[in-house]
Structure formats: C-alpha cells, structure tokens
Amino acid sequence: MVPVPLSVSKNSILLTGVAGLVAGAMSMAAGEYVSVQSQADTESADIEREKQEQADDPEND
C-alpha cells in the first residue's frame, strides 16, 4: 500500500480515481472505435474487389 500524506483530502483522492477511471474508459473506447473502423474498411475493400472480379469475369460465378 502506498503511503498517503495527511494533507491530501479524501475528495482529492476520489477525484483522482474517478479521473483515472474516465480516462481509461475513453482510451478503451477510442481503441475499439479505431479497430471497428479498420475492420469495416477491410470488409468494404473485399466487397468492392469481389464486385470487380465478378464484373471482369461473369462466367466464373
């Protein structure tokens, strides 16, 4: 356990904890958003490639 100076109020500790919680949640949300957008871009590119392949060679469907 980390020693806490007596001059630090409980409100300061609570505020610091809540700020850390919010920052962590926002960081995870941003990472998830980037991940989902990347996957969506990949899927969209795959669909476009398949459409182009079918347009170029409709005999091999």
Image (cartoon, grey):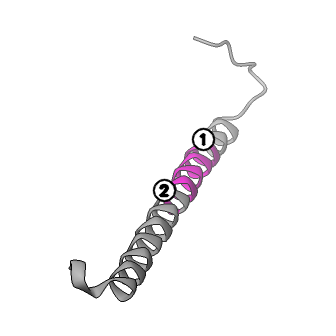
Q: Which disc number belongs to residue 6?
A: none
Nearer to us in this view, 15 or 21:
21
> Label 2 is placed on what type of residue?
Glu
Q: Of the numbered discs in the image, which one, if any, rests on residue 32? A: 2
Please state which amino acid type lies under the numbered disc 1: Leu
Question: Where is residue 22 shown, x and y percent of the image?
Answer: 58, 52
- Tell me: residue 21, above or below residue 8: below
The span shown in magenta is 18-33
Relative horizontal placement of residue 20, taking residue 57 as reference (left or right): right
Q: Nearer the viewer, residue 18 or 39?
A: 39
Q: Residue at x 69, y 18 (%)?
A: 4
User: In this rendering, would 30 be left or right of 12?
Assistant: left
Main SS, magenta residues? helix
Q: Quadrant of residue 9?
A: top right
Instruction: Locate the N terminus by quadrant.
Output: top right
Write the residue at 74% across / 30% down: 8
Residue, disc 1: 14
